[in-house]
Amino acid sequence: MQKERYTFEDLVEIMKTLRSPNGCPWDREQDHESLKKYFIEETYEVLEAIDMKSPEKLCEELGDVLLQVVFHARIAEENGSFTIHDVIDDISKKMIHRHEHVFGKARAETADDVLDLWDKIKKEEKGAKTQTDILKDVPAILPALMRSYKVQEKAAKVGFDWDNVEDAWKKVKEEMEELHEAYTGGDMEKAEEELGDLLFAVVNVSRFLKIQPELALTKTINKFIKRFEYIETKSSESGKQLTDMTLEEMDALWDKAKELDRRGENDEN
């Protein structure tokens, strides 16, 4: 089936072949549940490609996500549930319905107008009778920071929100004190609760700053790994193992890595 250039229909047929009795044993064994982890991985790899600002990598990773969509659709078709054409039909109808300002008579002059209209239409589609229904509709499987952000956004739609970022910041300080009081008092169950409250309050601040906390934390993790690598590399160059170094020595190298980051000299490998 070698071709110079393949189409979407070719991809659908390739998946059909892979799932056939004479196809791939691994592909035949998969179901919706077993593929969940791969969908998550591929989605995050798309985000990484965007951060890398690599069109080639982004093209590749979007293809991997598209493969997952086609894979799930093929399994569903075999089960008699739906086909890839139903998926395309459904999303096309949804986009037309939710963009009444483009395809219908509704008006939306700004991006905020569009979001308000979108929320109104989604609420009608899902038959949500209360704002609590809207909060519950945020998928529980989302990463907690992302889910917190979305829940807070939806609560803010009806005015349940701080007036400004300074009020949100005061809440962070309050939750920090309550966490400190809980753990110093030896009540670890309370400490867990207060830690959750603190993280939720931090997300509130990030929302006011229009910073996605999930992405911000990911950047910090990557930064931590890069600086830790610097410490380990310099340790090795001096003939030492990390376990042979004092915390003060590692802290000094950490500060050096931070300084190099600020000057743009501590490049990632």
Image (cartoon, rainbow, N blue to C red):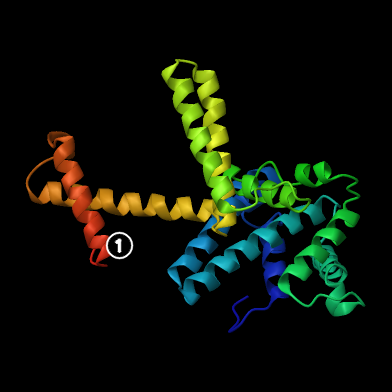
| Element carrying mark 1 | loop
Residue 245, picture quadrant: top left
Residue 171, picture quadrant: top right
Query: Label 1: which residue?
Result: 268
Q: Which of 245 and 240 is in front in this view?
A: 245
Q: Which residue is situated farthest in the bottom direction here?
A: 4
Image side of residue 268 versus residue 232, left or right: right
Image side of residue 155 versus residue 240, left or right: right
Q: Name the quadrant of the N terminus.
A: bottom right
Image side of residue 188 versus residue 245, left or right: right
> Crowding near pointer 1: few (<14 within 10 Å), some, many (20+)?
few
Q: Residue 26, relative to residue 180: is it above or below?
A: below
Residue at 75% from the left image edge and 58% from the top image edge: 74
Query: Can you give x and y, in whole percent of width and height, for residue 224 in the image?
Result: 33, 49
Confirm whether residue 203 shows in the render. Answer: no
Image side of residue 175 versus residue 106, left or right: left
Q: Residue 255, relative to residue 263: is it above or below?
A: above
Type of amino acid under label 1: Glu
Q: Which of 71 and 112 is in front in this view?
A: 112
Total number of numbered labels?
Answer: 1
Q: Which residue is situated farthest in the left direction here?
A: 239
Query: Can you give x and y, in whole percent of width and height, for residue 231 in the image?
Result: 20, 48
Residue at 58% from the left image edge and 40% from the top image edge: 200
Q: Name the quadrant of the C terminus.
A: bottom left
Q: Which residue is situated farthest in the top direction here?
A: 186
Query: Can you give x and y, in whole percent of width and height, for residue 168 in the image?
Result: 57, 46
Q: Which of 45 and 222 is in front in this view?
A: 222
Confirm whether residue 154 shows in the render. Answer: yes
Query: Can you give x and y, in whole percent of width and height, for residue 262 in the image?
Result: 27, 63
